[in-house]
Amino acid sequence: EVQLVESGGGLVQPGGSLRLSCAASGFTFSSYSMNWVRQAPGKGLEWVSYISSSSSTIYYADSVKGRFTISRDNAKNSLYLQMNSLRDEDTAVYYCARESYDSSGYDWGQGTLVTVSS
Amino acid sequence: DVVMTQSPLSLPVTLGQPASISCRSSQSLVYSDGNTYLNWFQQRPGQSPRRLIYKVSNRDSGVPDRFSGSGSGTDFTLKISRVEAEDVGVYYCMQGTHWPLTFGPGTKVDIK
């Protein structure tokens, strides 16, 4: 069974930093591209960042470019999101998601809440 | 960026009746490989999203066959043939053809 478990969320002041982690199991992590997607309270889904299976290709949403860094450690089956210079508008539940465009599924974690507030 | 629009944004339905959600993109979602990377996700209250449909019309494993997807180019539809109580939630279309990935605003389905 595919499992994605995010951690690292919490309350942080504007301008602060957090590092989110996503622990993957139940599939060959090194074979899949991964995404971070966030959802502000009561709002819709917003894509944040993408990393290919080998980390060779990385993309960011304009709203986080230059402030967030996505990375992965295939040996540890883990995905990360380093978030710096956090703003009020970064407050959201952050989900990691396994990307696929075939029958293997597009799986999501349970999310971790990041609250940016003074 | 590709803008995804959905209609309606709110959809009250009667149990056992059909429902239909429209999704339109500001650009064609046909990729250079000939595939159209349009997904549909369901998010039940208090839960993480779950993909229902990939590449326009392919149903994910475990998704009831009352869900179907159709469309092409810039115009797509998710249909529920007979709505059940467990279908309550918000439905999002998402395009994966162009960067950045973009989602529609969501359609909230509830029971009349």
Image (tube, coloured by chain):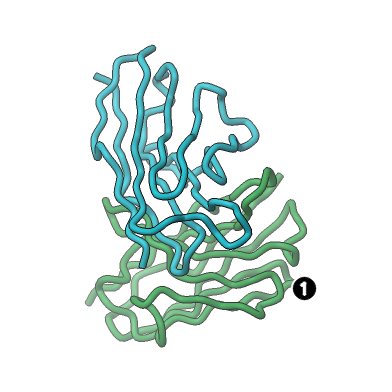
Chain colours: A green, B cyan
Q: Position of residue B1 (x, y in %)?
A: 36, 68
The answer to which of B60 and B37 lies nearer the viewer is: B37
Write down the residue under mark 1. Answer: A75
The answer to which of A47 and A6 lies nearer the viewer is: A47
Q: Residue at x 44, y 81 (%)?
A: A68
Q: Is residue A97 left or right of residue B109?
A: right
Q: Residue at x 31, y 67 (%)?
A: A91
Residue occupying the far top of the picture: B16
The answer to which of B34 and B110 lies nearer the viewer is: B34
Q: Position of residue A81 (x, y in %)?
A: 51, 75
Dot 1, crowdedness within 10 Å: few (<14), some or many (≥20)? few
Q: Is residue A62 left or right of residue A69?
A: left
- On the image, which quarter does residue B91 sit in? top left
- On the image, which quarter does residue A72 sit in? bottom right
Q: Amino acid at mark 1?
A: Ala
The answer to which of B20 and B51 lies nearer the viewer is: B20
Q: Secondary structure at mark 1?
A: helix
The quarter of the image holding the N terminus of chain A is top right
Q: Residue at x 34, y 71 (%)?
A: A11
Q: Is B79 situated above or below A93?
A: above
| Chain ID of residue with mark 1 | A
The quarter of the image holding the C terminus of chain A is bottom left
